[in-house]
Image (cartoon, rainbow, N blue to C red):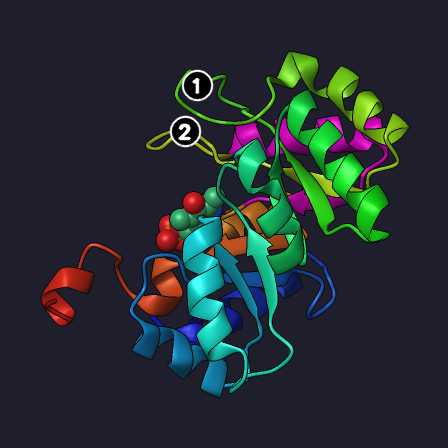
């Protein structure tokens, strides 16, 4: 457990997959983690973090950034259209682009600002009704739409169904990305990031294996 252990495992997975050391970007998922744990990871030099809520991320990182410049934040949770303006101001990368209306809003904001976060389109590879993301069968058409809006889409992101073999989901994501000519693949979390690297991930999103369990938070820091 901890950043060093996860980095060592990531480097080993890269080597095993014949990939260069550092080829895979590690997003440390700090959502719902106590500030002390996040500060400890920042103090060790890591600068790439993932958050799933815009407002919580704004508050937390406004306080941390003066002490730790150079942080790159990734939004990994669903983005409501009415929070898009705040999100583009706060995040370097938005990994949860998943519907035409949000794409349109981001394109308008990008035009007004002359800049846009790097984007990943989330694909609901398991076609789970409760989960965000475009359906696999709709991904090609959605990606074509997004391209017409000149949005900077770097790749695809997926969250495979819990308690199922992630490999078919990683492969599906990769094949959609190949068809679309996209290089970025954000896939793999604490339980399966090494498998994801073997399947071609370029970005992994790891929370509990770095910071400890989110559920334990109340017990560790009451109040
Ligand atoms: C919470 C979360 C993660 C990290 O999950 P862990 O199992 O703690 O590594 C990764 N990706 C997304 C989209 C998440 O919401």
Residue 4 visible here: no
Q: Which residue is mark 1?
A: 128
The residue drawn where x is 57% and y is 63% is 26
Q: Position of residue 49 (x, y in %)?
A: 53, 64
For this view, does 50 lie left or right of residue 210? right
> Is the C-beta of the residue carrying label 1 under 8 Å from the nearest atom of ligand 1?
no
Q: Position of residue 120 (x, y in %)?
A: 68, 41
Relative to 83, is 143 above or below? above
Is there a contact, CB below 8 Å, between mark 1 and mark 2? Answer: yes
Relative to 206, is 221 above or below? below
For this view, does 78 lie left or right of residue 104? left
Q: Main secondary structure of the magenta part?
A: helix
- From the viewer's side, name the closer residue of 120 and 181: 120
Relative to 126, is 9 above or below? below
The residue drawn where x is 73% and y is 52% is 117
For the residue labelled by badge 2, is the local secondary structure a helix, a strand or a loop? Answer: loop
Q: Quadrant of residue 207?
A: bottom left
- From the viewer's side, name the closer residue of 24 and 120: 120
Relative to 158, is 74 above or below? below
Quadrant in the picture for the C terminus:
bottom left
Quadrant in the picture for the N terminus:
bottom left
Residue 65 visible here: yes
In the image, which residues are magenta?
Answer: 167-187
Q: Is residue 186 located in the magenta-colored stretch of the structure? A: yes
Q: Is residue 159 located in the magenta-colored stretch of the structure? A: no
- From the viewer's side, name the closer residue of 80 and 98: 80
Q: Which residue is mark 2?
A: 161
For this view, does 218 lie left or right of residue 59? left
Q: Quadrant of residue 153?
A: top right
- From the viewer's side, name the closer residue of 155 and 39: 39
Q: Position of residue 112 (x, y in %)?
A: 82, 46
């Amino acid at each position: 457990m901890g950043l060093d252990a996860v980095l060592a495992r990531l480097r080993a997975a890269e080597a095993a997959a014949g990939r260069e050391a550092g080829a895979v970007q590690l997003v440390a998922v700090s959502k719902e983690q106590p500030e002390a744990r996040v500060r400890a990871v920042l103090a060790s030099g890591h600068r790439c973090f993932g958050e799933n809520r815009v407002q919580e991320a704004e508050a937390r990182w406004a306080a941390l950034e003066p002490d730790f410049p150079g942080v790159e934040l990734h939004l990994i949770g669903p983005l409501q259209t009415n929070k898009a303006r705040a999100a583009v101001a706060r995040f370097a990368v938005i990994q949860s682009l998943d519907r035409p209306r949000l794409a349109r809003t981001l394109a308008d904001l990008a035009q007004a600002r002359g800049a846009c976060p790097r984007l990943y389109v989330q694909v609901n590879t398991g076609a789970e009704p409760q989960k965000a993301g475009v359906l696999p069968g709709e991904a090609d058409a959605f990606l074509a739409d997004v391209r017409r809006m000149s949005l900077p889409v770097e790749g695809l992101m997926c969250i495979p169904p819990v308690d199922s073999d992630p490999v078919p989901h990683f492969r599906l994501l990769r094949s959609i990305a190949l068809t679309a000519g996209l290089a970025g693949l954000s896939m793999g979390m604490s339980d399966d990031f090494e498998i994801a690297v073997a399947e071609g991930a370029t970005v992994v999103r790891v929370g509990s294996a770095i910071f400890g369990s989110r559920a334990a938070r109340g017990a560790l820091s009451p109040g």
